[in-house]
Image: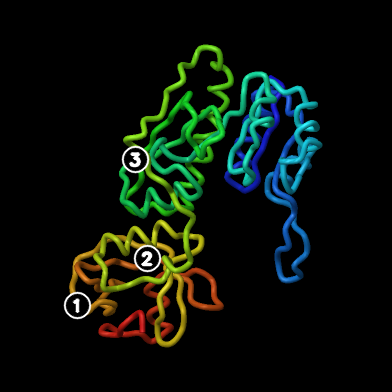
Amino acid sequence: MRVVFMGTPDFSVPVLDALVAAGHEIACVYCQPPRPAGRGKKDRPSPVQARAEALGLPVRHPVSLRSAEAQAEFAALDADAAVVVAYGLILPQPVLDAPRRGCLNIHASLLPRWRGAAPIHRAIMAGDERTGVCIMRMEAGLDTGPVLLRTETAIGPEETTGELHDRLSALGAEAIVAALDRLGTLTPEVQLESGVTYAQKIDKAEARIDWTRDAGEIDRTIRGLSPFPGAWTMAGGKRVKLLRSGLAQGSGAPGEVLADGRVACGSGAVALRQVQPEGKGPMSAEEWLRGARLPVGSRLGE
């Protein structure tokens, strides 16, 4: 097929590669404009733009698709379909209507659960046992369109958002190739309103750990916010990110350091696996506790 690809971050890159490998003609790649990044704050192209240029594909990064000119330029691409994955702009109705066989979105949840901006984070933070990817025919509402294809996977008991992100990206790449191959035979599945939940954008205020909470909730928060934006706590007057954790046996005052990298919570305990102290790289929790001179009985969060 002749396809317009619309995506921006790392999550989208394997999908673009899969479409090219499957032999689809990429009429154009749309992504977000370059943004200032790094110490010099120079404009840096998005991962999708960098990959598209390496593949020799034409790239556009309009600030908006709402103008008549931008919509006419999109329609002139004469595409069979558009594949959209973590693009970052709302598609107006004229853009949705332009491809002959519609705009297909890859969404990283089992719709209608976790519509919206942060489905991977929210699935882990909520303690979901399973998630997946859906290929959805796009319409004007937020992730409301009919589902053409869905692929499920289990969430590991200590899996982080970063790890699940990479697995779902690969699953999405496989699923969209299968969906395009079977586009004329797939039966659209209307989403039931009874199962709708919304994956709100992560608020930075959610990232500070409240040690008075249940160990399960704290563990899910640590894993769900890893690697970005990163759950954190204060320790010895310094801020430290908590990157990996698991549930553990033990009890004590909330935030009390127990043996073997365990920390007491409001009920139960978590085992810290990996942390990142302020100004340093990731390291094991035991290494950090030794270096920071935080013996058993110390309190985190203060």
Pointers 2 and 1 in contact (CB under 8 A)? no
Q: Position of residue 35 (x, y in %)?
A: 72, 58
Say whether residue 117 is left or right of residue 38. Answer: left
Residue topped by disc 1:
252
Q: Residue furthest top?
A: 185
Q: Distance between the residues labelled 2 and 1?
A: 19 Å
- Label 2 residue SS: strand
- Label 3 residue SS: strand
- Label 1 residue SS: loop
Residue at screen point 35% across, 68% down: 272
Residue at screen point 48% across, 53% down: 162
Nearer-the-camera pick, 32 or 262: 32
* Sooner in the amino-acid sequence: mark 2 or mark 3: 3
Q: Which amino acid does label 2 sit on?
A: Arg
Residue topped by disc 2:
273
- The quadrant of the picture occupied by the C terminus is bottom left
Residue topped by disc 3:
130
